[in-house]
Image: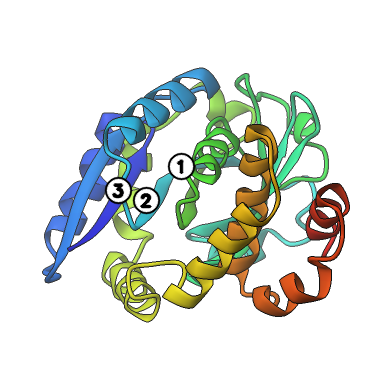
Amino acid sequence: MTKILFVSALSAELKIVKEEIKKLNFKNIEISFLESWIWNYNTIFNLTKFLEQNNNFDFIINIWVCGYSFHSMPLLQDWEFKKVIQIWRIKNLANNKEKIIPNFLNFAEIESIACSENIVYNSSEIKEENFVDMESYWFELVAEKYNLPRIILKVPVDEIWEETKKFDFVKAKKFLKENIDYKKLMSELEEFLESKNLNLFDKKEEKLKNKILTYYKWTFSEKVILEKEINKFLVLELWDIEKFFEENKNLDKKEFLKRLKNII
């Protein structure tokens, strides 16, 4: 049985997602829903707590709304086609750190987004970015920690400044219902999970991963870092893990880990 988790910040919007998903009929898929609430600490705490108790999902989907700015849009009409966006890069405005999300699905137009710890009322605060929210960076932080395949979908609703001050919840729910093709999303997700056999790694890769993890005498922290790097590259299918191991196993463990982290 495939297990999928949908995460939205607020219950009203999550209800829309739940209603649309329940209209569909997919066999052998168990779907759960989580209200993570808004802001960074709420997202981290609620999602982490939930996954600690239910850490057996095959895919996790974050769907919610975001703000947008036209400050770098040359033509207003270009915007009309951006009904829903898929996030691949997140810029944390508080510390200028970035996160890149592995591209598990090609569902919607790929975009970058700024993530703020405070409500943004001035588009200059998000600099070169066109979109902003308050949860995506923290969702990715937790999903990455648990090594879960994921996708972040955002529906642009309110323009930064005037509309932000009078957020239209009716419009948000309408856009969440109408701007996402949920049937297409679930079909593509089902196809992805079938192609992966509900597992990110085949048995050969898992065996090789365990071989690397036990080849050196790693400290606990080194082992955590190592497994994270191995999983990342296995998911992205960027290189032959067996070939890499054979070519580099003569290195000492620090050099091995360094080369692994710098492989891109």
- Marks 1 and 3: CB-CB under 8 Å? no
The label on residue 56 is 3
Q: Who's the residue at 82% across and 38% down the image?
A: 127
Asked whether 216 or 117 is in front, the reply is 216
Q: Going by the image, does 48 lie left or right of 217?
A: left
Q: Earlier in the sequence, mark 1 or mark 2?
A: 1
Q: Quadrant of the C terminus?
A: bottom right
Q: Who's the residue at 62% across and 19% down the image?
A: 118
Secondary structure of the residue carrying numbered label 2: helix
Asked whether 184 or 100 is in front, the reply is 100
The label on residue 65 is 1
Q: Nearer the viewer, mark 2 or mark 3?
A: 3
Q: Nearer the viewer, mark 1 or mark 3?
A: 3
Q: Going by the image, does 243 lie left or right of 81?
A: right
Question: 119 above or below 56?
Answer: above
Q: Nearer the viewer, mark 1 or mark 2?
A: 1
Q: Going by the image, does 229 lie left or right of 260?
A: left
- Marks 1 and 2: CB-CB under 8 Å? yes
Asked whether 199 or 179 is in front, the reply is 199
The label on residue 142 is none
Badge 2: residue crowd in 10 Å (few <14, some 14–19, many ≥20):
many
Q: Amino acid at mark 2?
A: Phe
Q: Position of residue 65 (x, y in %)?
A: 46, 42
Q: Amino acid at mark 1?
A: Val
**Which residue matches tag 2?**
175
Q: Who's the residue at 81% across and 50% down the image?
A: 253
Question: 75 above or below 138?
Answer: below
Q: Quadrant of the N terminus?
A: bottom left
Q: Position of residue 85 (x, y in %)?
A: 54, 58
